[in-house]
Amino acid sequence: MKHFKLLLISGIIGVFFLGCSEEKVAKAEPVPVQAEPSGKIIKIKGEVFSTKNGKKTQLSLNSKIFPGSTLETGKDSLARVLFSDGGVIAIGKESSFALEDYFYSENEKRADINFKRGMFEAISGKIGKSNPDKFKLKAKTATMGIRGTHIVGNLKDDGEDLLACIEGAIVVEAKDISGNITTAPVKAGMQVKVDETNTEGIKPSSIEYDEILAIINSTGLKGGEKILEKALRNLNPKPKVKRKGSYFHLALGVNRKARENVRYKLISKITGVKINSRTGELKVPTQLVEDNPITVAVKVTAKDYDETKEYVIQKGDAKDWVDIKAGAGFIVALKNDGTLWAWGKNNDGQLGLGYKKFVIKPTNVFSKIPFKSFDVGENFVVAVKADGTLWTWGDNTNGKLGLDDYSTRRKPTQIGKEKNWNSVSVGESHSLALKADGSLWAWGENIGGKLGTGDSIDYTKPTKIQSDTPWEKVTAGMEHSLGIKKDGTLWAWGVN
């Protein structure tokens, strides 16, 4: 059994994993008897129950919630609770949490919540801001936040527990199977997964859009897609650039309303570049970027925030594009630094930006590792990164993303774990890819046998095409495929 304890010190959120094996846990001090309710149900669906002192009561809209009670939902149910300090706790279907204590007044502020299972959402209120040491949020994987922090999670009976930060920032600490404690900051747009067999510590990654959206929707919060779009923009912010005379002016986009005493400091020592330490307005002489872009590092600090960001400044007529492909109403292009950019139609997430809205100008597809090649289909993309990994996103009809399922992906998702992919070619709804050893792999729609597997069955994951001779190059058409082997022979298959 896993045990977690949470503490908040100087505005930093902590998650502490106390063990992987069964342990004795010190009993908490008895909660004082409290007649006043801590909150009330503001949204409810299906069957929701509260259990207190062994008595189980079915809840309805506006039902009052008292300390010492445990809330649980049934199948296809949800509950949202608004607390007296403005905080919100919500749970989705077949989920539960224990309200061990929650009291807010001018003189006394305290909260202690223990998530038990299922999907949850937490938006912290005034207690987390004014008395962080009195605010405790516990679970198998758990967190707590200052005011304005928005967190979601999924506590599974088996497997990994998921925790994601939608707004604000948290710090997660966890003990692995060997007893070593690791710490990881998790900012808006990032997530972590922890389980009992954790051996590599906590590794934050960008949010898995579809999974996090499912959690948000399950807890009854409206506008989940817009909320995640904002989180992803915060993860990879783009400064607003305006040209004024001989300078570029940039607004660095830190939300001053959500943070106190924001200050900006220029880290890069570049002649002529200036920054306003209070407003964050950056001035870059235009002559500095006449020929090549420059990178400017800025340190942003506040009471609850400390991060150094890098901004690439360049003229709008950049001359560093090396490849471009067009799908059905959308475009993807590659720069010589390995960054991938996309714009246009995005109804299936084919731009790889994590959301679905139409984009009118080149927008960076977030990746820590450069891309080396890519190709596009009618409404999906497959790409190879510099480390030899294979990635895909967009519409997944016929399993054409190669992920062994049929779910649409709105951001780059890795296909398998191999790191020996060399190139890829994409047709309207099928893909061909070569590995470094010259082997050919195919997946997706298989009308007319265009995959080369000897049948006409659709394949939802990369399948090796048998050949005695390695392949040199392949290309995928709408309903057929072509290839050249290393011996110089030319081959074709599919609809004729």
Image (tube, rainbow, N blue to C red):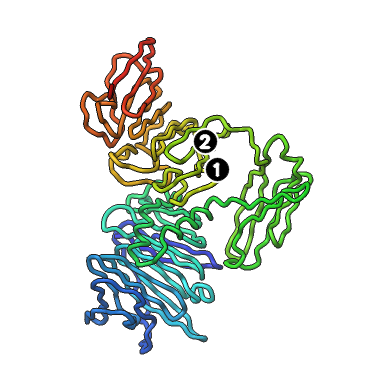
**407 vs 25: above or below:** above
Give the vertical position of 482 relative to 208 (above or below): above
Q: Nearer the viewer, residue 318 or 82?
A: 318
Point out residue 327 in the picture as x, y percentages from the top left corner.
Answer: 43, 37
Instruction: Please provide percent x and percent y for residue 347.
Output: 41, 48
* Dot label at residue 494: none
Q: Is residue 205 visible?
A: no
Image quarter for residue 431?
top left
> Nearest the camera: 34 or 354?
354
As drawn, 303 above or below 197: below
Residue 155 image-quadrant placement: bottom left
Q: Nearer the viewer, residue 35 or 62?
A: 62
Relative placement, left or right, of 267 versus 357 is right
Mark 2, other Cα within 10 Å: few <14 / some 14–19 / many ≥20 = many
From the viewer's perspective, is 243 left or right of 133? Answer: right
Q: Which mark is residue 333?
A: 2
- Residue 163 placement (x, y as % from top left): 40, 58
How far across and down, in percent of the image, does residue 363 sit?
Answer: 54, 45
**Taking 207 as reference, is 416 left or right?**
left
- Labels 1 & 2 near each other (Cβ < 8 A): yes
SS class of the residue under badge 2?
strand
In the rendered image, which quarter contains the C terminus?
Answer: top left
Look at label 2 and name its amino acid: Ala
Q: Which label's residue is closer to the chain start, 1 or 2? A: 2
Q: Three-letter amino acid code at disc 1?
A: Pro
Quadrant of the rendering where the N terminus is positioned: bottom left
Q: Which mark is residue 362?
A: 1
Q: Residues within 10 Å of mark 1 (few under 14, many from 20)?
A: some
- Give the Cα distance between marks 1 and 2: 8 Å
Q: Residue at x 26, y 70 (%)?
A: 73
Q: Say which element carries label 1.
A: strand
- Residue shown at 25% from the left, 30% from the top: 447
